Image (tube, helix red, strand yellow):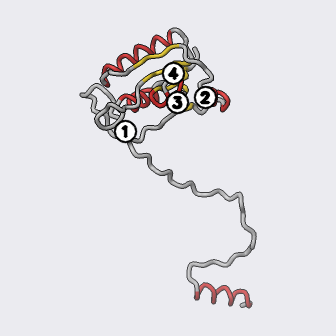
């Protein structure tokens, strides 16, 4: 037996499960094991008997489709594209607001509008928190024709209104 074999057996005796490296190079391009992605929590179920969406307090303020250019996103945020039509949902109950919004949206799509304004209010008069704003935002996020939406500029209603950019025909 050679000295290397003695060292190998001594090493394996002292550190079981450890193997001797025959090269001091590391392969940077070696395939890595994929990690398990974190599970997304399911949103709270919607009560279908109520006829309207359940709102969540963590609703996002804006949405931009990943295909929209950054310049166009900036123009939308800054109110650089003037709305072609608007709807005011102040005073509506949730179910009524959704019906009006669906009708308004279908007319806007038929007329081939690209930018519309939805005035939903900030919820200052609500007993607890805003009702229509998160309802409208959630509804918009589920519409295929909506490419972007964000809070309006001060002149158009600020956080009480949303610019909505629609897909072209």
Circle 4 residue: 145
Circle 3 residue: 150
| Marked residue nearer the N-terminal end (1 or 3) | 1
Q: What element carries label 3?
A: strand
Where is residue 148 shown, x and y percent of the image? 54, 27
Residue 110 vs 89, above or below: the answer is: above
Circle 1 residue: 56
| Marked residue nearer the N-terminal end (2 or 4) | 2
Q: How far apart are marks 1 and 3 (CA)?
A: 17 Å
Which residue is at 57% across, 14% downward?
169
Circle 2 residue: 78
Observer-nearest of 21 and 117: 117
Q: Please tell me how crowded label 2 is: few (under 14), some (14-19), or many (20+) other residues with Cα within 10 Å.
A: some
| Marked residue nearer the N-terminal end (4 or 1) | 1
Q: Distance between the residues labelled 2 and 4?
A: 21 Å
Which residue is at 44% across, 17% downward?
87
Where is residue 133 shown, x and y percent of the image? 40, 30
CB within 8 Å, label 3 to label 4: no
């Amino acid at each position: 037996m050679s000295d290397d074999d003695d060292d190998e057996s001594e090493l394996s005796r002292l550190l079981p499960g450890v193997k001797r490296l025959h090269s001091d190079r590391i392969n940077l391009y070696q395939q890595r094991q994929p990690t398990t992605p974190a599970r997304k929590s399911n949103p709270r179920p919607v009560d279908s008997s109520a006829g309207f969406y359940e709102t969540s307090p963590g609703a996002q303020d804006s949405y931009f489709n990943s295909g929209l250019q950054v310049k166009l996103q900036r123009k939308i945020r800054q109110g650089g594209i003037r709305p072609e039509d608007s709807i005011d949902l102040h005073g509506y109950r949730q179910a009524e607001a959704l019906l009006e919004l669906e009708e308004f949206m279908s007319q806007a799509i038929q007329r081939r509008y690209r930018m519309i304004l939805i005035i939903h209010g900030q919820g200052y008069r609500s007993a607890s928190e805003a009702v229509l704003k998160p309802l409208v935002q959630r509804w918009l996020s589920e519409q295929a024709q909506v490419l972007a939406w964000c809070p309006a500029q001060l002149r158009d209603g600020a956080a009480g209104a949303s610019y909505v950019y629609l897909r072209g025909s």
